[in-house]
Image (cartoon, grey):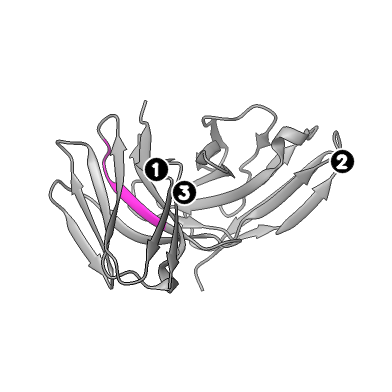
Amino acid sequence: EAQVTQNPRYLITVTGKKLTVTCSQNMNHEYMSWYRQDPGLGLRQIYYSMNVEVTDKGDVPEGYKVSRKEKRNFPLILESPSPNQTSLYFCASSLAGATEAFFGQGTRLTVV
Amino acid sequence: ELKVEQNPLFLSMQEGKNYTIYCNYSTTSDRLYWYRQDPGKSLESLFVLLSNGAVKQEGRLMASLDTKARLSTLHITAAVHDLSATYFCAGAEYGNKLVFGAGTILRVKS
């Protein structure tokens, strides 16, 4: 089954404790991205990757890092999480130039 | 820079009524998407509109695109409770980047 898998689904952590949210897709997609969803703001892109070892900032990259060492994986790293990063995070993937994007199930992160 | 505005942001409607959600965008967008999100769930793709005048329908939902007016609409016909959800429109900026509206929370009351 074609899918984008995020882990964990829920995470509560403390300020400053490094964490990684994993994202994996099994569709051989070139393009992967991370979004955060906040009430009244919709989804905003954090980082994206056009292919292996090619990443770039989206609209709200501060406080986040990503890497793309393999085509299928695109982890989101919070080196020193802060409460303003409490949000719902989605990973998405698509073929380059394709019309359809596939979204993961979401990760609800709470930073206290 | 593409900006996408939806209105209304909250819509409470009676079962059986019709209503329209509007999505305005600021610059040229290759395509326009409509997504549905149920509470605690991921985004479900409803429609992808690719060209001016495109109209797509699925059940009680119909989406249209007017690229000259930079406007897309999602029309709900004879609403039922199962349509209660949050609806997002999104435009595409330089390739695969999606720029989302704030979302419309739809509540259908019986």
Residue at position x 74%, y 37% in the image: A78
Question: Does B30 lie within the magenta span?
Answer: yes
Residue at position x 74%, y 57% in the image: A10
Between A71 and B8, the residue placed more toward the observer is: B8
The quadrant of the image that shows the C terminus of chain A is top right
Label 2, on which residue?
Answer: A14
The answer to whether residue A64 is left or right of residue A96 is: right
Between A28 and B81, the residue placed more toward the observer is: B81
Of helix, strand and loop, which one carries label 3? loop
Answer with mark 2 or mark 3, whichever residue precedes in sequence: 2
Between A76 and A52, the residue placed more toward the observer is: A76
Q: Are marks 2 and 3 on the same chain?
A: yes
The answer to whether residue B16 is left or right of residue A8 is: left
Q: Label 1 amino acid?
A: Asn
Label 1, on which residue?
Answer: B96
Label 3, on which residue?
Answer: A30
Residue at position x 67%, y 34% in the image: A65
The answer to whether residue B11 is left or right of residue B61 is: right
Q: Give the range drawn in magenta.
A: B29-35
- x, y percent for residue B38: 52, 63
Question: Does B16 lie within the magenta span?
Answer: no
Q: Are marks 3 and 1 on the same chain?
A: no
- x, y percent for residue B22: 29, 46
Between A81 and B72, the residue placed more toward the observer is: B72
Chain bearing mark 3:
A
From the viewer's perspective, is the residue at label 2 or at label 3 nearer? 2
Chain bearing mark 1:
B
